[in-house]
Amino acid sequence: MSVAQKFDGLINEVEDKLGERIVALRRDIHREPELGYDTKKTAEKVVAALDGLPLEIQTGVAENGVVATLRGGGDGPTVGLRADMDALPIHEETGLDFASETDGKMHACGHDGHTSMLVGAAHALCGMRDRLNGTVKFFFQPAEEGGGGGKVMVEEGALEGVDSIFALHLWPGLPFGVASTKGGSVMAAADAFEMEVRGTGGHGAMPHLASDAVVMSAHIVAALQTLVSREVNPVEPAVVTVGEIGAGTAFNIIPETARIGGTVRTVSDEVRNLIPYRMEELAKGVANGMRGDATLDYKFSYPVTKNDPEAASFALDVASGLFGEENAVEAKAPSMAAEDFAYMLEEVPGAYVWLGVGDVSGLHTPQFAFDEEILPRGAALLTAMAVESLS
Ligand SMILES: [Zn+2]
Ligand SMILES: [Zn+2]
């Protein structure tokens, strides 16, 4: 039987039986956003929404994460499905009835949707338990937005025994209802740097008696632009962004130090390792040439999110069967944003899949909102990927 035949009617079934529940949970989570590891109430809502299902539930994973296990009829492999639960420090401006009730916190990355879709999938999969030839593990993780909750889950051994794993992210800019992914690098590594540029302070009127950290910094920022344009193979994507620069206390003082901070995005280990090495040489070279010095503090953060090529084409096949061929599209290039699901994919082969919500305000913006019709569709996709992984 083809995937399309096997899951014929699944979307309607999920919509009819679970649609209201999924949307209600999403709105409940949306109203009360929580940041980082502090997802206690969200985790409680998840546990309450799974109540009565034949699941083994483990709470307190990576502080406030939840892992639920469904043992099917057969003793086949174990497939993992993951959602993130945390919100962002953004003040919501959507005007929705169920907008955030906490000033300065908002679900602006769709994680409320991811969590409710995964709860929906848990309900759907529990309903077909006897047909499942293996185990499904549902991972609800905190702290995706910078805290590395996925990494902590891996370190705590939550993924032990999992044979493959999948996750969805709602994706503005991709047509509504289209699933897209690719084998290999799908999201970038996100690293951070801070640089201290040191000269000699002095009077603004007597620059020859000082070495000016402001002028050095200006030249360093310009020189950093050559890292991507002159050092990295032009067919390889890479980003170096200076997001912070600061120096000085008064208009007539040449400051002794200046500070430069930024982010670097890369999609291969080779380029990821090249940039800090060349960044330091370049900054020191420029500063030394101007009678100063620069020191670099470089922090490696989320690694490249690498899909297993087979798992990625499997996910597209399932999406094609479920949504129609035209709604399952192989992505041409990775996104330069990052994702801590990367740590889970380092541990277990799997795929990270974007689910289009059309032309809405971007992720991490105060206006981000999406059509909730996508939620049962996403829940159906997670369900179908789990069933197929076990068959
Ligand atoms: Zn985000
Ligand atoms: Zn996100």
Image (spheres, rainbow, N blue to C red):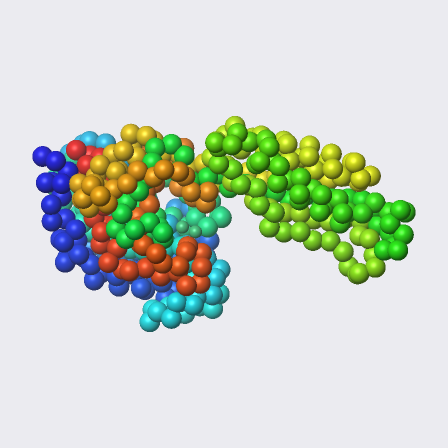
Residue 188: percent from left, percent from top: 46, 39
Q: Residue at x 29, y 29 (%)?
A: 310
The residue that appears at 49% across and 48% down in the rendered structure is 146
Give the quadrant of the C terminus. top left
User: Is residue 66 at all visible to an observer of this figure?
Assistant: no
Viewer-proximal residue, 130 or 256? 256
Q: Quadrant of residue 347?
A: top left
Side of 146 where 76 appears, left or right: left
Specify whether 28 is left or right of 304. left
**As drawn, 10 above or below 96:** above
Residue closest to the far top: 270
Q: Nearer the viewer, residue 13 or 244?
A: 244
Quick one: quadrant of the N terminus?
top left
Identify the image quadrant of residue 165.
Answer: top left
Residue nearest the observer in this picture, 289 or 6? 289
For the point 33% across and 71% down, the residue is 97
Residue 8 visible? The answer is yes
Is residue 294 left or right of 311 when viewed as pictured? Answer: right
Residue 305 locus on image (x, y percent):
41, 37
98 left or right of 280 in image: left
- How far from the left and from the top, in percent, is residue 65? 38, 49
Percent of width and height locating residue 272: 53, 33
Residue at x 11%, y 40% (from the top left corner): 6
- Does residue 200 sit above or below 182 in this rendering? below
